Image: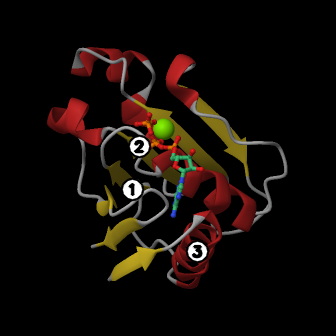
Amino acid sequence: MKFLSKNVEETAEIASNFAKATLANPNFEKNRAIVVGLYGELGSGKTTFMKYLAKAFGIEETIQSPTYVIEKIYELKDKSFKHLIHIDTYRIEKDEEMINLGWQEIISDSKNLVCIEWPEKVSGIMPHHTVIKFEHAGENERKISIT
Ligand SMILES: Nc1ncnc2c1ncn2[C@@H]1O[C@H](COP(=O)(O)OP(=O)(O)OP(=O)(O)O)[C@@H](O)[C@H]1O
Ligand SMILES: [Mg+2]
């Protein structure tokens, strides 16, 4: 699916629809989380998308870029998922750093929805995942594709 977002509100709507679609398709894979890779250059809208994705899942606290904390885990009240996990690998240099974060456990729990900014930094340990690409198309316009 391809979208052209003209402003932050439209990105919010795309994120909200993605949340609904994810919830409408339960994860039947045993021992495998749903993993989403958020690709795109600095300021292309990855964290903004996450902020509204979390909101659509009923998370009320403000989502900040986890660039400095690497990982944030939000508890979900929804039955299909227990955790929304937001990881920003921008500062990660080696795949082992992800292993030390408990990556193997994180991606082995079918109740986790795991979203990674800069997945290309840790491509060696990324399992099969949904790809969301963000591209600048103007000051407030962003191309967003989901495959
Ligand atoms: N249509 C749009 N969709 C999303 N963000 C937009 C849009 N138009 C303008 N923006 C602005 O672009 C910026 C996107 O920043 P954001 O932190 O989401 O990017 P990022 O891809 O996470 O960057 P980084 O790689 O540094 O983590 C925000 O300041 C946001 O307000
Ligand atoms: Mg970001």
Name the image quarter holding the C terminus: bottom left
Considering every residue shown, the one lying at the far left of the view is 124
Q: Quadrant of residue 89?
A: top left
Q: Residues within 10 Å of mark 3 (few under 14, many from 20)?
A: some
Looking at mark 3, is its residue's CB closer than 8 Å to ligand 1?
yes
User: Which callout, 3 or 1, points at the residue further toward the start of the chain?
Assistant: 3
Name the kind of residue labelled 3 in the image.
Glu
Residue 116 image position (x, y, % from top left): 41, 43
Residue 114 image position (x, y, % from top left): 48, 49
Name the kind of residue labelled 2 in the image.
Ile
Contact? badges 1 and 2 (CB < 8 Å): yes
Contact? badges 3 and 2 (CB < 8 Å): no
Residue at horizontal 54%, vertical 75%? 14
Name the kind of residue labelled 1 in the image.
Val
Residue position marked by numbered label 2 in the rendering = 116
User: Which callout, 3 or 2, points at the residue further toward the start of the chain?
Assistant: 3
Looking at mark 1, is its residue's CB closer than 8 Å to ligand 1?
no
Q: Quadrant of residue 128?
A: bottom left
Residue at horizontal 45%, vertical 21%? 101
Task: Decide if residue 139 is on the left or right side of residue 130.
Answer: right
Residue position marked by numbered label 1 in the rendering = 36
Tell me the SS state at disc 2. strand
Task: Decide if residue 98 is on the left or right side of residue 64.
Answer: left
The mark lying in front, picked from 3 and 2, is: 3
Residue 12 image position (x, y, % from top left): 62, 68
Residue position marked by numbered label 3 in the rendering = 10
User: Which callout, 1 or 2, points at the residue further toward the start of the chain?
Assistant: 1
Task: Kindly identify which numbered label has been placed on residue 74.
Answer: none
